[in-house]
Image (spheres, rainbow, N blue to C red):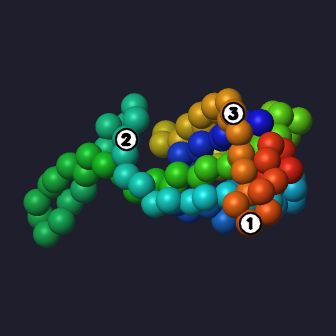
Amino acid sequence: MKYIIAIIKPGKLDEVREALGSLGVTGMTVSEVKGFGRQKGHKELYRGAEYTVDFLPKVKLEVAVDDALTEQTIATIAAAANTEKIGDGKIFVLDLGEAVRIRTGESGSEAL
């Protein structure tokens, strides 16, 4: 099993969610986060004064998938979140040692 964390632009969340749903991914966790990568924020103008926005709004998407679905999930997220502009985000993949569904006690892939 793999635990996939994707940091994407907020405007791409619906596209990514729909694409993952059509792939068969049954659950995900979404958090609104702020951060920056290589783009280091940007400058904005407000009432004639210029100021720097260091942390940009992003969405953190967390998905646990079976090993067989890992590559497809990564490719699906990357394709759906891509705008070909700076700040599209990143995908991190971690090994998931165990998963347990609290209601039924199922573990492993059955818990996903």
Which label is found at residue 53? none
Q: CA distance from mark 2 to mark 1?
A: 38 Å
- Residue denoted by label 3: 97
Q: Secondary structure at mark 1?
A: loop
Q: Residue lying farthest bottom?
A: 47
- Kind of residue indicated by mark 3: Gly
Q: CA distance from mark 3 to mark 2?
A: 29 Å
Q: Residue lying farthest front?
A: 105
Q: Residue at x 59, y 42 (%)?
A: 5
Q: Is residue 93 above or below residue 26?
A: above
Q: Secondary structure at mark 3?
A: loop
Tag 1: Cα neighbours inside 10 Å, few (<14), some, or many (≥20)?
Answer: few
Q: Residue at x 77, y 36 (%)?
A: 1
Q: Is residue 112 left or right of residue 34?
A: right
- Residue denoted by label 1: 103
Total numbered badges shown on the rendered structure: 3
Q: Residue at x 68, y 35 (%)?
A: 96
Q: Is residue 45 above or below residue 71?
A: below
Front residue of 18/102: it is 102
Between disc 1 and disc 3, the foreground one is 1
Q: Earlier in the sequence, mark 2 or mark 1?
A: 2
Q: Is residue 79 left or right of residue 109?
A: left
Between disc 3 and disc 2, the foreground one is 3
- Residue denoted by label 2: 36
Q: Is residue 23 above or below residue 93?
A: below
Q: In the rendering, at what x and y percent does residue 51 appear?
A: 16, 53
Does the image show residue 76? no
